[in-house]
């Protein structure tokens, strides 16, 4: 928001703030993020990372394994696998369609991450562990905005994420959550001790939209993949210089015209490398 406090941003918004307009450009518009929803379950404690919190001796042993042998659960990433799915290939119950239509875009639009812990379950049952599926919408249509709260550059901005504001986004998230319910039910049908804690019943066929929407409201979260508020083509040019300026460049996730359907580390590094090379070619 330093650009807006400096007079580079939407003219109407800057005028409302009493800031002289140096360059009328849509800084702060087009905000996107990967919205996620947790489905949390109780599982045997020995299968969950919550065991590290609840059993001090086990935690001490894992610390020793880590420092002495370079092994153990402290080396394990929280996310060890991911499931990518295309909701256009699922019916309303989360079941894969038998006959794929050739005109359907089969590019994955959701990511489902099994996690060996569950947010908020640490105090619910001291004898059980937590497990969750984090379902993330990779290609949202919804767009929000970032606005100045006042002219103090240190003040927190006003952020409107505007999550799931389109019918398509809401429908795709419901389809993905029903797929998650089928995955969880499959685990229990195979004999695994899994019990819904902060999640809908496991029968995807009978869970209504209202139940899923309540789950989205109660367990929805950001994944901190904020992008697109200084989008390439509208705010910055192909040299990453802010339009109307000479040497002010932006080289982060805000220049993506839309949020990429992936984790952002690699694309952001690519943008930074490209920006560095362009600057070096000049100097």
Image (cartoon, grey):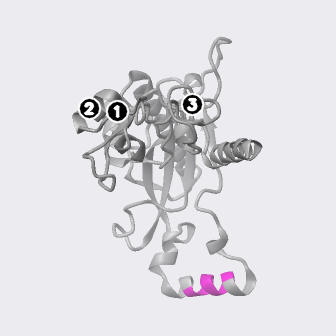
Q: Nearer the viewer, residue 55 or 240?
A: 240
- On residue 21, which mark appears? 1
Quarter of the N terminus within the rendering:
top left
**Viewer-side label of 1, 3:** 1
Q: Residue 174: where, in percent of width, then height?
A: 43, 32
Residue 44 lies in the magenta stretch: no
Q: Nearer the viewer, residue 40 or 275?
A: 275
Which residue is pictured at 46% across the width and 77% down the height? Answer: 53
Residue range in magenta is 60-66
Among the 4 quarters of the image, the one containing residue 79: bottom right
Are the two marked residues, 2 and 1, in contact with CB atoms closer than 8 angstroms?
Answer: yes
* Label whose residue precedes the other's in the sequence (2 or 3): 2
Are the two marked residues, 2 and 3, in contact with CB atoms closer than 8 angstroms?
Answer: no
Name the residue that disc number 2 marks.
15
Q: Nearer the viewer, residue 136 or 196?
A: 136
Among the 4 quarters of the image, the one containing residue 54: bottom left
Which residue is pictured at 50% across the width and 74% down the height? Answer: 51
- On residue 232, which mark appears? 3
Q: CA distance from mark 1 to mark 3?
A: 21 Å
């Amino acid at each position: 928001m330093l650009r807006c406090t400096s007079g580079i941003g939407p003219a109407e918004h800057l005028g409302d703030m009493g800031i002289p307009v140096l360059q009328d450009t849509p800084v702060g518009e087009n905000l996107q993020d990967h919205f996620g929803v947790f489905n949390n379950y109780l599982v045997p404690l020995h299968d969950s990372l919550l065991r590290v919190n609840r059993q001090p001796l086990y935690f001490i042993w894992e610390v020793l394994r880590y420092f002495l042998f370079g092994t153990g659960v402290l080396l394990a990433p929280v996310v060890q696998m991911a499931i990518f799915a295309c909701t256009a290939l699922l019916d309303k119950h989360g079941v894969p369609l038998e006959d794929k239509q050739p005109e359907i875009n089969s590019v994955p639009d959701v990511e489902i991450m099994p996690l060996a812990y569950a947010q908020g379950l640490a105090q619910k049952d001291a004898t059980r562990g937590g497990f969750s599926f984090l379902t993330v919408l990779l290609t949202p249509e919804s767009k929000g905005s970032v606005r100045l709260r006042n002219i103090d550059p240190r003040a927190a901005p006003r952020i409107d994420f505007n999550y799931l504001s389109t019918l398509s986004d809401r429908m795709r998230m419901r389809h993905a959550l029903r797929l998650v319910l089928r995955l969880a039910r499959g685990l229990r049908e195979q004999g695994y001790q899994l019990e819904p804690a902060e999640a809908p019943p496991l029968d995807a066929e009978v869970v209504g939209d209202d139940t899923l929407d309540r789950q989205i409201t109660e367990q929805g979260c950001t994944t901190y993949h904020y992008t697109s508020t200084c989008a390439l083509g509208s705010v910055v040019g192909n040299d990453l210089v802010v339009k109307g300026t000479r040497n002010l460049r932006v080289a982060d996730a805000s220049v993506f015209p839309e949020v990429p359907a992936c984790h952002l580390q690699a694309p952001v590094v690519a943008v930074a490398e490209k920006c560095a090379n362009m600057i070096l070619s000049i100097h």
